[in-house]
Image (tube, rainbow, N blue to C red):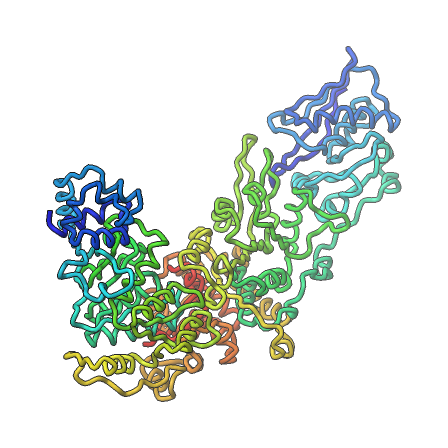
Amino acid sequence: MFCYVQTGAVSGMRCDAIRVEVDCSSGLPCFQMVGYLGSEVREARERVKVALKNSGHPLPAANLNVNLAPASIRKSGTSYDLPIAVGILAALGKLSQEDLSDTLFIGELGLDGDLRGVRGILPITEDAASRGIRRIILPLTNVTESSLVPGIEVIGASCLSEVYEYLSASPEERSGIISPAGTFDIESYLNSAESEAPDFSDVHGQDTVKRAAMVAAAGFHHMLMIGPPGSGKTMIAKRMPSILPKLTPKEALDVTSIYSVAGLLKDGKPLISSRPYVAPHHTITEQALAGGGSIPRPGVISLAHRGVLFLDELTEFDRSTLDIMRQPLEDKKIHIVRSFGSYTYPADFMLVAACNPCPCGYYPDMNKCRCTPTQVNRYLNRVSGPLLDRIDICCDVEAIDLCDSDIRNKPDPLSSCVMRERITAARERQAYRFKGKQISFNSEMSVKDIESMCRLGSAGELLFRSANETLGLSARSYHRILRVARTIADLEDSDEIRENHLAEAIFYRTSGSRYWGK
Amino acid sequence: MNGSLCAYWLSITDGIGNASARSLLEYAGSYEEIWELTPGELASPALKLPPSAVSALKKERNEDEIQKSYENMLASGISFYHDRHPAFPGKLKDIYNPPSWIYVKGKLPDPGKLSVAIVGARNCSEYGRYVTRKISKALGDAGISVISGMARGIDGIAQKAVLESGGYSCGVLGCGVDICYPPENKDIYDFLLSSGGLISEYRPGTKPVSGQFPMRNRIISGLSDVVIIIEARERSGSLITADMALEQGKDVYALPGRVTDALSHGCNRLIKQGAGIILSPEEFITDMITDRLLVQNTLEDPVTEAVPAEEGLTKARQMTLTALYDLTESEQKIMSVMDFYPKSVKKLQDETSLDPASLYAALTGLTLKGLTGQNGNHYYLSGK
């Protein structure tokens, strides 16, 4: 008898509908599987055979053939165990095909018939719901993740015999066996989520840097901090997520999908509720940054999607590794081509980088720095110009003398809460401006948007022309400065970009070039 | 073989250094006679030549080839003077371990004019850079020659400023005169070729090797009447020049600095040990001239008025600046605390208590108006 079961697979962020076809006929007893299988999938035969036997359904002496269609897509992973087992039960006539056709099965089996969680559940569920599948049966551990998607009945089972019992019962009795999981209220979950990031009020006496950080966070601009060791660059970067606007439900689902595909969702935390903060060590490889493997998993830049990618000691990173980010920084996604196909992962992150100004770290403090001008130059030139050109905000962090009681006793350093309030206001102005557009931050404005939304007064035009003559700005920097100026105006609650907004934006843009002498 | 050609032959022979050349000259009496020395005489213990030098001199000599290489060198604009040559600078003959010959590109310093050596740190501060320019310009205007080493930092800045003011400067190199080292000073090298001079005791083509640089310092101090040290750390090459100058009986002046600046430690120590102190270029020039009782034609009316202290800006100057450049309120505030000593952005904020946003905007404004210069994140008055 022939039967089929629906399942799904992710490759990259794309989902494919997979049909598990099983045929049971008389003949020489055997159990064969075909359909472009990876080695984990080939091993499913042994797991399924034993799991079925231990759940009370020993395989009869019959000719069993399993095909995973379409046979042109390579199958990998362990999520096919459950659909194969269910398909066999149906082919043996123990379950009826009608109960299976509008249901998606997914899960890994243990030899005792236990169901184990798999990765990529969120995108697969989303895809199934969009294809009109009514019900999904999966391991218990994946239930909350799957219930993030509205409009689909989510049934979590702990073992194979539970699935069999559920399916063989009449539709009325089924909810008594396993009740469908309720839909997850994403919005209230996000609102109740407490930010785990440390607070800016721990940072004393760095008002100049905090201002730059605030502008960066308000418009989602990339930022570079230059300063001597121990001046607090890492401390500031760690606090960036605390002032970023909260994730919207759509952003939260996007980020959770990536973590789901990467298999990095933590138990008990089905939804990523705060902006990611990823800080890879500078020995990171190109593959780890961009996404690697024959079927690539999301790289660090994708894991930082909608959050902060912090690169400490920027100059110590391998130059070719850093240059990988040039295209994602423009396109907000990364395309990876492998022999099995091409994969696209979103990579819309905020780059926060930190480095020392010279090998010893103290330039331009001539009392401490003993580096020659050539050494200073060579040190900063380890980072390629095109990458630096994509960083809008560059600011200096200076060492604070904490023994100076003036700094410690200064009342209330600016706290994340105060900063976030102003950023949220700026964010609302942006949301209003971009109503009906695909973008949500000033940093995403296209050249056309800039022309219509970042008009300068005559004083501003004049300032820009003089800056262009004195400092020699490129065409790319013209637009980048305007985006930052727009954010500063938003922070100051001003409709027009005033001269001082523009001057501040020019400062952020050009202050780095003083180090690498442009 | 004439004297120059013989000396030239010695200078291009491997294994013959300054010391060997001098003992040869003492033994033979003149360069022509060195050429005639027999192998037996060369090996005589009275000469005390090292065996390598003896074997080098005993080698077969091709007079035509030497002549040809000499003419090629002259054709490439390099002159060669041995210490018996009338054009050889007299000041160099009197120093300890004088060079036996020099290669020259461009003009030699005028022996009738006063000359001052300006040396200092390669990695100098904004303050050092500023004062060097001022002094050099004043010296150039007063017709005083400036001798230096064309190194990065103070040396190059001094020479460039002198040449720009129309004065004469001479660079003493630690490599061949046909090599520009450091390469980034190519503009100064070219400038020195056209309106100054380059001197080296090393034959053309000699690569810059670190051991040769302290040696050329004795020529720098030897060629000058007074040595000025602008900035020097506690252990610095410039202090070697100062030591050599003292050995040669020259006056040493040093530019004072703050005791907290590592770059001024060497200078301040020299002052403590009795070096002259530089308070202003004009005062220095007057001091130097009265010391020597040598009045130059170009300096008939020496300027004696002291310049005002450069710390901060006077109120009057600030008002002029405001009127001239249309400064905003926060720009004025920054200008009032700005100094020739570079200050960091954070320090400026602490001193002006401006909010960061207006501070950033004002700094951009001042930069565009050309009133400030930057050194990393440190800002200083551009002296405009």
Residue with the most extreme top position: A28
Image x and y of residue A417, in percent? 65, 70
Image x and y of residue A123, in percent? 66, 43
Image quarter in which the N terminus of chain A is found: top right
- Front in this rendered view, residue B142 or B366: B142
- Front in this rendered view, residue A419 or A36: A419
Residue B6 vertical position relative to residue A25 in the rendered view, above or below? below
Residue A121 vertical position relative to residue A462 in the rendered view, above or below? above
Q: Is residue A381 left or right of residue B41?
A: right
Residue A367 vertical position relative to residue A139 in the rendered view, above or below? below
Q: Is residue B172 left or right of residue A102?
A: left
- Front in this rendered view, residue B369 or A133: B369
Image x and y of residue A217, in percent? 56, 63
Rendered image quadrant of residue A211: bottom right
Q: Is residue A12 left or right of residue B263?
A: right
Q: Is residue B262 left or right of residue A35?
A: left
Look at the image and tell me whether residue A200 can be seen. yes
Look at the image and tell me whether residue A498 can be seen. no
The residue located at (52%, 41%) in the rendering is A335
Image quarter in which the C terminus of chain A is found: bottom left
